[in-house]
Amino acid sequence: MTLKCTINELQSAMNTNTASYWESYLTQQADYLIVGAGIVGLTCAVELKKHQPKARVLILERGPWPSGASIKNAGFACFGSVSEIVADAAHHTEQELIALIRKRARGLEQLKAIVGSRTMNFQQVGGYEYFLNTQAELYEGCLDRLKWADDLAKEALETTETIFSTVNNEFGFTQVMDKGILNHHEGHIHTGRLMEALVKEASSKGVLFYGGVEVASHEEHKNQVFLNTHKHGVFKTRKLLLATNGYTAKLLDNLVEPARAQVLITRPIPGLKLKGTFHLDQGYYYFREIDQRILLGGGRNLDFDSERTTEERTTKSIQEALERLLREVILPHTSVEVDQSWAGIMGIGDKKSPMIKALSPNIYCGVRLGGMGVALGAGVGSSLAELAMKA
């Protein structure tokens, strides 16, 4: 579905709108209208108000609160495991890889600067990558390129400190190789606290947030953009900024590819101690502890075609695979019960770098975060704001 319609269609929608005079005031023309209240959209709004405090900045969100991947992720503050970096090397130059790692690391610092490390409960607990016994070739290949990956990360982070080193399997995982690789700089956050803090920060700057509004179409006319919604009439703005990442596929054709990520969380497990963030199978599986529970996600590689969707639902096959991994590899000698499961939609493409671009003189996008929204989101939001303010 494209995000296009005619001026006549929009005018017709405006004429049949039953909004009150007062509601019309609330929807008066914005200077900047942002679609999507995730990390990108909210940080973009904060940046716009920072530089143009008198500008009318409005965020539209289809859910009653931020409801995209930003609130459905696992809360990993990471910039890439060794196996991911090795895999990315097939499609990127070394300088591109260094730039990617640097962007992710700097994005995390920007996020901390906006909301504070303590507020989002950032903890640099380290990121552990382990390899299944069936992945001996991948395991050996990553060990062979460990120094190479470490040198790249050092250059990206502008440090002489060791980033990646080998570690033993000290957590009692089964069906994995004896050694793993530790990323000393990785950590995790509390995603709920982060998003709450971003909403508060945007509100304190005077950003207007309208939830429960689903976009239908848009049209540019002279120096205005008309944005038609399904149930809330037409919004007018000087500049439209799209920050819906994987959902952008529904708004503009062929811009970004959606990728569903399924997650589950267990009931509390007494005595659980699993400090760190953990990756398996080139990052396609990931897990961590929170509130004495295991939060586990992934499995998209089991069925790439079916997971190329914006449907926010879980599937039996992948949920069963996650549960097997939980009971057979992660906690093989512990009784566990699944408490909740959900799905979020990422935005991916043929390159790992995000897409920040002008689509027309008055319409811009900041999308394709490749599953690294926590790390990249603030940087993308800031760059998107800068791009829109320049024009």
Image (cartoon, helix red, strand yellow):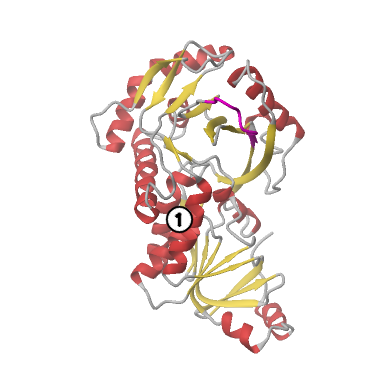
23 up-or-down from 368: above or below: below
For disc 1, the neighbor class at 10 Å (few under 14, some 14 to 19, many from 20) is some
125 up-or-down from 143: above or below: below
Q: Residue 370: horizontal and vertical position, in percent?
A: 52, 43
Q: Is residue 148 left or right of residue 360?
A: left
111 vs 9, nearest the viewer: 111
Image quadrant where residue 284 sits: top right
Residue type indicated by callout 1: Ile
- Residues rendered magenta in the picture: 264-272
Majority secondary structure of magenta residues: loop
| Identity of the residue drawn at 46% across and 15% down | 170
What residue would you read off at disc 1? 356
Q: Residue 274: horizontal and vertical position, in percent?
A: 50, 26
Quarter occupied by the N terminus? bottom right
- How many numbered marks appear? 1
Q: Is residue 188 left or right of residue 271?
A: left
- The residue tagged with tag 1: helix, strand or loop? strand
Q: Residue 67: horizontal and vertical position, in percent?
A: 61, 55
Q: Residue 206: horizontal and vertical position, in percent?
A: 44, 72
| Identity of the residue drawn at 34% across and 69% down | 51
91 up-or-down from 359: above or below: above
Q: Residue furthest bottom?
A: 21
Image quadrant where residue 210 sits: bottom right
